[in-house]
Amino acid sequence: MTNSHSDALVFLGATGDLAYKQIFPALQGLIRDEGFNLPIIGVAKAGWTLDQLKDRAKASLEAHGGVDPEAFAKLTELLRYVDGDYHDSNTFAQLRRELGEAQRPLHYLAIPPSLFATVAENLAQSGCAANARIVVEKPFGRDLESARELSRTLHRFFPEENIFRIDHYLGKEPVQNILYTRFANPIFEPIWNRDHIRSVQITMAEQFGVEDRGKFYDEVGALLDVVQNHMLQVVSILTMDPPSGEECDATRDRKAELLRAVRPLTPDSVVRGQYEGYRKVPGVAPGSSVETFVAIRLHIDSWRWAGVPIFIRAGKMLPVTCTEATVEFKRPPRETFGEIVPSGSAHMCIRVNPDFSIGLGVRIKIPGERMAGRDVELDLHTQAADAMPPYERLLGDAGKGNVELFSRQDIVEAQWRIVDPVVGNVTPVYTYKPGTWGPEEARELIGADGPWTDPVMEGENR
Ligand code: BG6
């Protein structure tokens, strides 16, 4: 039974935001690209009819990538709807009836985490959890303890191999490509260590603000929204040891090992910022001290990485939308041509958003008599970001029982262990102007290991 395909897809929270932005487009994509042909049952408490849910699906697709008439027709044919309260056992009895002959349903919990325990229990009591898979969304808990509690709750009804924890960064083609590029080429591994690398920087910049997500965001903040999960996944893929063996857990084992070697954060390795105007966003508390920007310095206590600082900064209302990692190489033991070379000159830059690219920073000689050079970036490769959108890939994988691109409880706990000491108001929050690179204090954090390398967008020169 372990790897058999799911035979029905249930998504709870069918009328909500996640379904609207991600799940309907993913389902249409799966039908169009993979011939997905299973009953799809939406569950929500909205007092809606099935026709209303179909209208919502159409509106979702119009707003996110467009309606494919054939695939959409199939989607509406497969779609069913159960309307009811998540606390009411009748809702789940009705769901069980809708599931009919299905033996291996996949339940996607696109609902607030506060409902997970109730829903998991009701799924179990109604017979909907037998042999079923369950998909949950980050954040997995609010700190290490609540993450453990959530895991205990889910494990009461679902064994670990049937729990799929979505971190959509893992479903991104460019993030997969970092892993591939590192381990499918022989030239990187010999230099991928403290002997050759001076520092690593990761920037996740978003030009937009919190917009209509004020209520959610104000309970989370940048550290828990994107660093504890997406950014630490990227760190682990960039710095993990090569996986060995063919097991689907080989990569996850190496990641877990790496994350366990990261030193927990201390207040002096964190700078938090909040953009001017954030407190006026609907849903945000008037005196909120939640951060919309965070910069951190990490250390990995391993032979490979001892002494190499890893910097991450992530924020909203920054000058551009771009996620990239810059690996800075050490300079030669002496500058043969007696030049003063700017820091960051020798580097590799891997961009994962808005497209995938790899650039190699090197010096080349300026034509003329003098042995003097300048920095250039060799554009090794550029390609579009997502051949298959992350949610489509991940939903398809969950249905097939492929766990590789999902987080695992020990990885989640290792990530919490890193950020736990600085969760909440442990450090001050500094204001920054929209359209800038966060508060001045972030520059002080990187200090002599910097400066931060700001992404260079199309048409600009580094
Ligand atoms: C989500 C966060 O997990 O990731 C958002 O909640 C963030 O705040 C988003 O904007 C970024 O994802 P992507 O795929 O647009 O880089």
Image: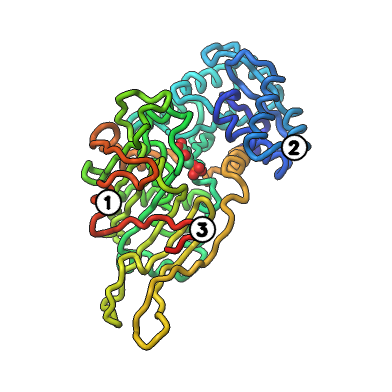
- State the CA–CA distance, disc 2 to disc 3: 35 Å
In the picture as drawn, the residue positioned furthest to the bottom comes out as 369
Q: Quadrant of the N terminus?
A: top right
Q: Amino acid at mark 1?
A: Arg
Residue holding disc 2: 71
Q: Earlier in the sequence, mark 1 or mark 2?
A: 2
Q: Amino acid at mark 3?
A: Glu
Residue sitting at 76 percent across and 28 percent down? 77
Image vertical order of residue 88 relative to residue 333, above or below: above
Image vertical order of residue 46 relative to residue 393, above or below: above
Q: Nearer the viewer, mark 2 or mark 3?
A: 3
SS for callout 2: helix
SS for callout 3: loop
Residue holding disc 1: 443
Q: Nearer the viewer, mark 1 or mark 2?
A: 1
Say the numbered circle drawn on residue 458. 3
Of 354 and 202, nearer the camera is 354
Q: Earlier in the sequence, mark 2 or mark 3?
A: 2
* In this picture, residue 174 sits left or right of residue 146: right
Q: Toward which corner of the image does residue 3 lie, by quadrant? A: top right
Residue sitting at 71 percent across and 45 percent down? 33
Of 311 and 188, nearer the camera is 311
